[in-house]
Amino acid sequence: MACAFFGLDCKVYMVKVSYNQKPYRRALMEVYGATCIASPSNTTAAGRAILAADPKTNGSLGMAISEAVEVAAQDADTKYTLGSVMGHVMLHQTIIGLEAIEQMALAGDEPDVIFACVGGGSNFAGLAMPYLGRKIKGQSKARVVAVEPAACPSLTKGTFAYDFGDTAHLTPLIKMHTLGSAFVPPGIHAGGLRYHGMSALVSHVLDLGLIEATTVQQLDAFAAGIQFARTEGILPAPESNHAIAAAINEALRAKEKGKQRTILFNLSGHGNFDMQSYMDYQAGKLENYDYPAEAIAKSLEGLPAVK
C-alpha cells in the first residue's frame, strides 16, 4: 500500500487485490481514522489512465505509489515518504540484524545460513546487512539468502538497471533489480512481496555476489507456515512463510547429508490479519504461479534509456 498524510489524516491507496484479500487490515486502518482506497482508482489522473488501459486490473504497488505521490504533490500540506526500498529504511531496519547478532552470541553460536523473505528489501536488509558487515570483515562465513515468490521474481529473473519505482513514473530513477515498472503481478496472497523492483542496496550486494536469491512457490510457502504454526504456536504472515519454507528445506538437506547447520531466519510478521489466505489455502483455492519469461521481457521493454 502507499500512504499520503494530510496533517493528522491519512489517505491509503491500497493495491486493489490486497484491498479485497485483506479486509481486516483495511478495517484496522479505518479504526484509526485512515481512508482506504482500492488502487487503481478514479480519484487520481494516474489511476484513471491505468483503469482506461485495463479496467479489470488487480493493481500493483507501483500503481498505488503513483496515486499517492500524485495526491501528495498537489497539496502543500501533504507529505509522502518512500519506504521499503530506500536506503534510510534499510538503515532503520538493521536493528533486527544487530539484535540477532547479540542473541546468537548469548546462545554461543553463529549462523551457517541466513534466510529472509524479500519484496522491496527492507525486511531482508534489516536482518542481512549487519551480517554482511561481519562477513566482509571476516567475522562470519554465513550464506545469506533472499527468498522471493516465484510469481514476482525481481532478483532471480529481473534485470539490474535504472527504473522508476512507480507505474506513472513520478518517482526518481533507481538502479535496482526490476521486472519493469509496467509489471503487474498475479494476485498471490503475500501482498508485501509483489513489488516490481528491489532495494538498490539489496540489488547491489546481489550483483557483488555477497548474497544469493531463490524463489518459493505459494503453496509451498503456506504449507511451511502451517507446519510452523503447529510446531511453534505462532501463525506467520504469508510473506514470512517464504523464509520459513527455505529454512525447512535447508534443514532437510542438512539432515540428509548428516551435517550440522545453524539456520537463522526472520519471522517478519504474524498472520492474524491474513486468515482469509489461510482459509483459501486449506480450501484448495490457491495455486502456484511461475511468471512467464515472455511477460517479463515485455514488461522490461519499457525500461528508461540511461547513458
Image (cartoon, rainbow, N blue to C red):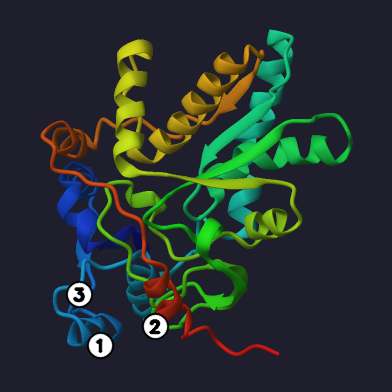
Cα distance, mark 3 to mark 1?
9 Å
Q: How many marks?
A: 3
Element carrying mark 2: loop
Q: Secondary structure at mark 1?
A: helix
Q: Residue at x 73, y 31 (%)?
A: 142
Residues under numbered marks 3 and 2 in contact, where contact means CB atoms less than 8 Å apart: no
Which label is found at residue 49? 1
Query: Which residue is painted at 18% across and 42% down in the image?
Result: 24
Q: Please tell me which of labels 3 and 1 falls first in the chain.
A: 3
Viewer can see residue 251: yes
Mark 3 neighbour class, 10 Å CA radius: few under 14, some 14 to 19, many 20 or more? many
User: Foreground: 28 or 282?
Assistant: 282
- Residue 307 quadrant: bottom right
Residue 218: image x %, image y %? Answer: 32, 43
Under circle 3, the secondary element is loop
Side of 109 where 66 appears, left or right: left
Residue assigned mark 2: 168
Q: Is residue 301 above or below residue 212?
A: below
**Which residue position holds label 3?**
41
What x and y, as percent, mark residue 250?
Answer: 55, 26
Q: Compare marks 1 and 2 and give the one earlier in the sequence.
A: 1
Q: Nearer the viewer, residue 264 or 42?
A: 264
